[in-house]
Image: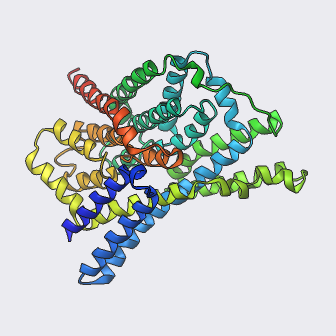
Amino acid sequence: MQSIIILIFLLGYLAIIFENKIRINKAATALFMGALSWGIIATKAFLIQNILNDLQIHLVAISELVFFLLGAMTIVEIIDAHDGFQVIAEKIKKEQPFILVWKIALITFFLSAILDNLTTAIVMVSIINKISQDKKAKWYLLSLVIIASNAGGAWSPIGDVTTTMLWMGAQVTSFNIMHQTFLASVTCMIIPTLIISYKLRLTKNNFAEITSISKISYKERNLILFIGVGSFIAIPIFHYFTHLPPYLGMLFCVSIMWMITELLHHQKTESQKDIFSVQQALQRIDVPSMLFFIGILLSVAALQVTGILTQIALSLDHYVHNIYILTGSIGLLSAVLDNIPLVAAAQNMYPLGQYPTNHIFWELLSYCAGTGGSCLIIGSAAGVMVMGLEKISFGWYLKNISWMALIGFFSGVLIFMIQQQF
């Protein structure tokens, strides 16, 4: 059964890579491979109830992410409808593309540490769409967002799911993970930024001039932007104090935004209110991207349930005994597989008695698992979402961006190693 599941995953993976060649939408492929994998697991199971229990557990985790994404994309669409991102776009727009590239990288890097890499990627997609309409320039900037958001999330205990897992599992403490992985994460972001800024240095004409006829007052625009960004910042605070899943905080913030927009525009005509309504924002959400996300997560869950991911982790543990090679391998594997089950497997295999809290193994694992996914566009939640929203092809990213991300990844590991010597 495991061989069949692996074959389905590999064939589905290839179909996603060559989406433009075979003319089949990647969302359809992802859903097909996810559903078929679970169907095969069910036919080979001795007790179907056990499989249903496993599926329910993974479905809960997937649903939490989907609800979180739904809420985040709704808030982003509300802000965008009120021209809120126009304010940010105007602030970072400069005549020199070199400066613009660095501003985007730095904003993404630090914003993802405060929010999380997935939310940050969604926000930055909207901003970049207002800066450039040129396909080449936009895809480079969006790829930079993937790299910078993953790097920014890796050094913050709330910036990436895997870092949060290690923090909640007592493998790392908040201050120590920030202190030990910040330089490595910055390096991982800086090197691709340098390369991309060099590639776009002569593409000034590819960046659109920001001109817009606002449909809303300046005061209302700033109010919605302030509340929207404040909502994103409030979500980790909500999670910290209530210990409830982040998607509940996100849905709570959506409800606040919904009520505020209703009150803000209650005196306008129905046609005027419709432009700024949450109902309209929900209609603009890219549903195929959500389905692609669900299909990928279902496929990876199938690999986890059949024990394939655990066997990979155990094989690494058996054959690799160097901490740097082991964590680096997990990081690179996370570009193909999901980093969450890989980190969970590592947490189960290595007790705190072997690697105590704030051991360099956990710190480097946090960096590698968070940033290794940038090497492939479907290697991280941020990459999957950007790929779905902006139709960046797997092949283009592999050819033009993967090598930059790989250099940045290994450079960060090197900086981490040097830092340990001092």
Q: Quadrant of the N terminus?
A: bottom left
Write the residue at 58% across / 34% down: 128
Left or right of 365, for residue 87: right
* Residue 400 visible to an observer of this rendering: yes
Residue 117 in the image: above or below residue 90: below
Residue sitting nearer the eye, 322 or 208? 208
Residue sitting nearer the eye, 148 or 393? 393
Counting labels gives 0
Q: Quadrant of the C terminus?
A: top left
* Residue 401 visible to an observer of this rendering: no
Tell me where residue 41 sits by quadrant.
Answer: bottom left
Left or right of 151, for residue 70: right
Residue 197 in the image: above or below residue 84: above
Residue 51, how many percent across, how many down?
32, 77
Residue sitting nearer the eye, 43 or 165? 43
Residue 75, how many percent across, how many down?
64, 49
Write the residue at 40% across / 61% down: 29
Residue 61, how many percent across, how many down?
43, 62
Tell me where residue 357 sits by quadrant.
Answer: top left
Residue 221 in the image: above or below residue 20: above
Residue at the left extreme, as displayed: 319
